[in-house]
């Protein structure tokens, strides 16, 4: 497929990593291979501000070069160019209807949206203990936050693939979960498809078994395996592991056994599902996968498996447009730029444009663990991240503000959490409409106002059709320049404006600038 970029045309698509550099235009020079660059939220879709879209049923390569777009797929699958629309919204609606129509009767649990979520990763890193988790939860309530969803992150289990609480860290995990429930929390726990390649648990799935004739055969109904039938070793940030294959009923049943035991024995309410971006470089010993499965199929199967649980969260998804999957944006650095605060809005906009609207920005203050382990938190940055997240459909804290920040920043974070709760009725209206129509919750300005020159603006967004959110995302800034769309608007301070003009708003550290259409 080859096409020229039209005059004044802009493009979004592919992978959320890099979406802060979107939209792509005639001046863009970039090559994207969705087989290798398929990480976190990704889809085989590109959308144009002129109503066009590019789609393929498999990962493909695309190049923007000198005003020309070239795309091809190695899976003998056609790359489609559709030119039936006039603007970005047309392109999305046409692509959605043709390739990822939303499931019927979607309903995502409102508990994800009502109050900020808490994930203990930045508070405890891998030092998860019964005492530490209870203290973390009790502090949340004591500091005036509404108990909602609480996620226990990596480090609680004996080892990967053995989903038992580490007895040295947890003397009575059932009592811990009971205490969290007593405080008012819904308890989710971190899990992955990875299994440590040692110990009886691994060998029980791996070892040969005897047939009725007495001959031994190698099991092929467990794990991702290479073309020779050998266990694939997955390279990931915490080592090398075997991987369950959720294209196989036996591996789905094995994971069911493990997770249902956590529900039944300990009262766990749901799961944070991590991992799943399988790319050619992911496996240490596989050129191709036994059974003919593609890596993209393996990724999607993992997400579809976990999405059946009422309370679930995913970060690594491929081609999940139209599903009810609850997703969190990829881990953010505690930084102003380069996958820091600068990426929250573009990333959030992007996920809506690939059909994944049920989105949570990464943790307020950042979720990339090295800051908590080796660095310090900046009050201004932490506060601005809280403001930016407050009017996303979901909001999630990890590092606890009162442990790291001064009084002013602590108050701002609390105020933003309360603003999110106060806005829940409005968020729920937009959410309910999205569940029916599939349109994004967090929207690009050009999606809602296609003829007003918003294509390259990445520092504000629309929450549904009626709320324009314009947080400060630049270090040291105490003003926010806002180009208001045509129409009548009222800001967060009650001041009314006629749209179609550019306004400079005073934006002290404790102010989130936003507007409602009137």
Image (cartoon, rainbow, N blue to C red):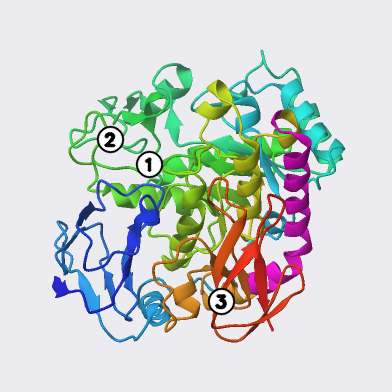
Look at the picture and state if 478 lies above or below 164.
below
Which badge, 2 or 3, comes first in the chain's sequence? 2
Distance between mark 2 and mark 3 Cα atoms: 55 Å
Residue at (72% x, 41% y) in the render: 409
* Image: 70 above or below 477: below
In the depicted view, which residue is nearer to us: 390 or 152?
390
Label 1, label 3: how far apart the Cα atoms are = 49 Å
Q: Label 2: state its secondary structure.
A: loop
In the image, residue 480 above or below residue 381: below
Measured from the top left, where is residue 189 in percent x and y?
Answer: 62, 37
Residue 158 visible to the viewer: no
* Residue depicted at x 81% and y 48%: 146
Stretch in magenta: 404-431
Quick check: marks 2 and 1 in contact, CB under 8 Å? yes
Q: At 62% from the left edge and 53% from the top edge, which residue is drawn? A: 478
Q: In which quarter of the image is the N terminus?
A: bottom left
Which mark identifies residue 245? 1
Q: Quadrant of residue 240?
A: top left
Q: Is residue 270 visible?
A: yes
Are there few (<14), some (14-19), or many (20+) residues within 10 Å of tag 3?
some
């Amino acid at each position: 497929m080859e096409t020229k970029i039209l005059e004044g045309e802009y493009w979004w698509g592919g992978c959320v990593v890099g979406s802060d550099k979107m939209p792509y235009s005639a001046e863009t020079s970039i090559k994207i291979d969705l087989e290798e660059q398929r990480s976190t939220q990704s889809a085989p879709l590109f959308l144009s501000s002129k109503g066009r879209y590019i789609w393929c049923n498999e990962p493909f390569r695309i190049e923007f070069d000198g005003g020309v777009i070239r795309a091809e797929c190695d899976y003998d699958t056609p790359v489609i160019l559709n030119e039936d629309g006039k603007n970005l919204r047309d392109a999305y609606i046409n692509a959605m209807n043709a390739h990822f129509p939303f499931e019927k009767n979607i309903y995502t649990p409102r508990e994800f949206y009502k109050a900020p979520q808490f994930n203990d990763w930045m508070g405890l890193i891998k030092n998860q203990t019964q005492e530490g988790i209870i203290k973390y939860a009790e502090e949340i309530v004591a500091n005036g936050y509404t108990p909602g969803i609480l996620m226990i992150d990596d480090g609680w289990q004996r080892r990967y693939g053995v989903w038992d609480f580490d007895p040295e860290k947890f003397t009575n995990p059932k009592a811990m979960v009971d205490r969290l429930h007593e405080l008012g929390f819904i308890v989710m726990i971190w899990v992955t498809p990875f299994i440590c390649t040692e110990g009886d648990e691994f060998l029980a799935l791996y070892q040969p078994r005897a047939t009725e004739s007495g001959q031994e055969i190698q099991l092929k109904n467990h794990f991702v395996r290479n073309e020779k039938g050998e266990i694939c070793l997955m390279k990931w940030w915490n080592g090398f592991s075997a991987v369950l294959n959720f294209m196989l009923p036996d591996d789905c049943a094995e994971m069911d056994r493990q997770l249902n035991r956590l529900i039944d024995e300990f009262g766990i309410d749901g799961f944070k599902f991590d991992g799943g971006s399988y790319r050619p470089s992911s496996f240490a010993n596989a050129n191709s996968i036994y059974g003919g499965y593609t890596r993209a199929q393996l990724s999607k199967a993992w997400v579809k498996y976990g999405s059946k649980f009422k309370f679930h969260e995913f970060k690594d998804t491929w081609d999940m447009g139209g599903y009810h999957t609850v997703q969190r944006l990829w881990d953010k650095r505690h930084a102003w730029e380069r996958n820091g605060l600068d990426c929250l809005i573009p990333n959030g906009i992007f996920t809506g444009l690939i059909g994944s609207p049920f989105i949570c920005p990464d943790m307020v203050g950042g979720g990339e663990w090295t800051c908590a382990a080796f660095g310090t938190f900046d009050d201004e940055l932490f506060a601005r991240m809280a403001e930016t997240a407050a009017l996303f459909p979901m909001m999630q804290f990890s590092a606890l503000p009162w442990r790291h920040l001064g009084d002013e920043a602590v108050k701002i974070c609390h105020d933003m959490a309360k603003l999110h709760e106060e806005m829940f009725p409005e968020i729920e209206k937009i959410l309910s409409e999205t569940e029916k129509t599939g349109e994004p919750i967090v929207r690009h300005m050009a999606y809602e106002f296609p003829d007003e020159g918003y294509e390259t603006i990445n520092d504000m967004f629309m929450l549904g059709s009626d709320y324009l959110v314009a947080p400060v995302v630049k270090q040291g800034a105490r003003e926010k320049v806002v180009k208001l769309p045509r129409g009548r608007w009222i800001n967060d301070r009650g001041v009314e404006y006629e749209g179609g003009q550019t306004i400079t708003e005073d934006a002290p550290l404790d102010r989130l600038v936003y507007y409602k259409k009137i």
